[in-house]
Amino acid sequence: MAPLNVAIVGGGLGGLAAALRLARRGHRVTLFEQGERLGGKMNRWEAGGAAFDTGPSLITLPWIFEETFADAGERLADHVELRPVGPLAEYRFPDGASFAHDTALPAWLAVVQRFEGRLDGFLDFMRLGARLYELSRATFFAQSPGELPSPAMLPALRHLPLRGGFGRYHAVLSRFVRDARLRRMFDRYATYVGSSPYEMPSTLAVIPYVEWAFGGWHVRGGLYRIVEAVAALAARRGADLRVNARVERLLHAGGRVRGVALADGSEHAADAVVFNGDASTAGALADLPGAAPLPPPERSLSGVIWLAALRRPFPAAAHHTVCFSADYDREFDDLFRARQFPEDPTVYISRPAATDPSAAPPGGDALFVMANAPADAEPWNETAGASARAAMLRRLCASGLPDFSADVTAERLITPRTMADAYAMPGGAIYGRHSHGLRRAFRRAPNRSPLLRGLYHVGGSAHPGGGTPMVLLSAKIACRLIEQDGGRRG
C-alpha cells in the first residue's frame, strides 16, 4: 500500500497516538495543535517549584499503554516508569466515617465486611464487572460502531445474557451493595465518564472492576511524561508535530475530505484527516448543513480544578482522597437538572507526592483539587470561580482536612470556561457526550466519521469513550480503518 498523506487535527493523547502508529507504518503525518504545547487536556503546569498534571491524575489498564508502545517497536518501561498507587483512595463521608479503598484483597475485604456485614454482594458485583470486561475487550474495545462483527468476538458472547448487566447503574448496584457509604463510593465511578450514577447504564459496572482488578497507576514525574514520550517517538518516526497551528476548516469535495485550512491562511492537502477534537464540532469546521456543537443537555460533566503549591506538606497521607457531599442526590440534581455548580460539592484531591516525592517542591506539597461542574451552565467569571473554590474548601474542612489556603505559594484555577476556550470543548465538557442510556453510552461518534469519507475520529468524545486507555484504543481503531480504506481515495 502506498503511503498516505494524513493530517491530524489536535495534539491530545489520541492525536499523538495516531501520529505515532501511522508514522511507524510509513505514512506521511502532519499534526496541527492550536495550543502552545502538545497534550490537550492531558497537560502540565509548573509553578512554585511544583509540576502539576492538569488533566488525568491516574491511569488504569496499563496493558493498553504497553500495547501502544509495543506497536511502535518500543517498551513502555524504557520511556516512563509506572508506580502502583496504594491504597487507590481514601474516602471520607459526612457522618465521619472513612476507609481506604485498596486493591490488596485481604485489606479491602475487611473493609467490605466491616461496612456491609457480608462479602457475597461485593464479590457478585465484581463478577458482573469481570464478565462485562471480557465481553467489552473482545467487542466494544476492538471495533468501531458500524463494523461487521469479527470471528474473534464470538467466544466473548458466552457472557450473554448478563443478569444485572442492564438497567440503571445505581439501581443495579443497590441490589449488590447495601451499605450507603460503599454504594456512594461505587456511584462515584460514573463521574469517570462524566455522567450520573442514577442515569448511566449498569453495563458501565466494568469501570470499578477494571480499577480493582488492574489497579491504579501513577507515572513518575507526572502523567504528562506519557504525552512527552509518545510525541518524541512520533517525531522520531517522521511525524511533523506543529503547535500554534489552528485548523479553521476541513476541506472537502464530492463527499470526501481533501485536507485542512489553517488560521494563517495556508492549506494542507491530505488523503485522510484524523480529528482529535470534540466530535460534535467537526461538522461545523466542514461547513456542513445543520452542523452544531453538542447542546448543553447532552454534555458530560466538566469540572473546577484548583492547583495549589504549598509551603509545607499536606497532612492527608493518601495519593487520592475523596470528600463526599452531605447530599449526593441533590448534588447530581444540581449538576444535570438545575445545571449549576453545587453549593456542597464532592471534592477530590490528588496528592502525587504520596507516591512520587518529585511532584512537590522541597519541604512543601502540591495538590490537585477538583469538583464536578456542569458544562457551560455558569458565567465562570472571577466571582464564580472564587465562589466554587470557597465551596470546595468548605467541604474539605467539613470532612476533617485542614484549611491549607494560608500555605499556598502558587495557584491556578481551571474552570469549564477555561477548558472550553483552551481545547475547543463545548462548554468544557470533558468527555463530550454523557453516558446516560445505552445509546449514548455505546453509540459515541464512530471512529470512521459518517460526515465525510476519509475523516476519522479519535479522543474521549469518540468511540470507545473517555479516559486515557480508551483514547489510546480509539487511535488504534482509527488507524486500522485508515489503512483498510487507504486504497479507496475517490
Image (tube, rainbow, N blue to C red):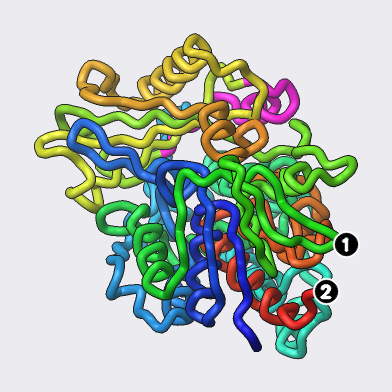
Q: In the rendering, which numbered label is found on residue 254?
A: 1
**Up/down of 371 relative to 462, above or below:** above
Tell me the element at label 2.
Answer: loop
Which numbered dot is residue 105? none
Number of the label disc, if any, that sits on residue 490 = 2
Q: Position of residue 48 (x, y in %)?
A: 20, 31
The x and y percentages for residue 263 are: 59, 40
Residue in view at x 77 percent, y 48 percent: 286
Range of residues picked out in magenta: 322-340
Assess disc 1: are there few (<14), some (14-19) or many (≥20) residues with their C-alpha within 10 Å of its C-alpha: few
1, 391: nearer the viewer: 1
Left or right: 134 as drawn, with respect to 114: right
Residue 366 sits in quarter: top left
- For this orientation, the residue located farthest to the front is 266
Q: Position of residue 68 (x, y in %)?
A: 47, 74
Quadrant location of residue 241? bottom left
Above or below, 488 relative to 346 = below
Q: Residue at x 81, y 63 (%)?
A: 256
Q: Residue furthest top?
A: 383
Residue 418 in the magenta stretch? The answer is: no
User: For the residue marked with disc 1, what is the amino acid?
Assistant: Gly
Identify the residue at image location x=67%, y=71%: 136
For the C terminus, the quadrant is bottom right
Asked whether the residues under the numbered discs 2 and 1 touch, taking CB atoms below 8 Å apart as contact, a structural biologist would say yes
Work out how far the residue at label 2 is from the one at label 1, CA to CA, in angstroms: 9 Å
Question: Please, is residue 160 above or below residue 372 in the view?
Answer: below
The residue nearer to you, when weighing 70 against 195, is 70
The amino acid type of the residue labelled 2 equals: Gly
First along the sequence among labels 2 and 1: 1
Count the marks.
Answer: 2
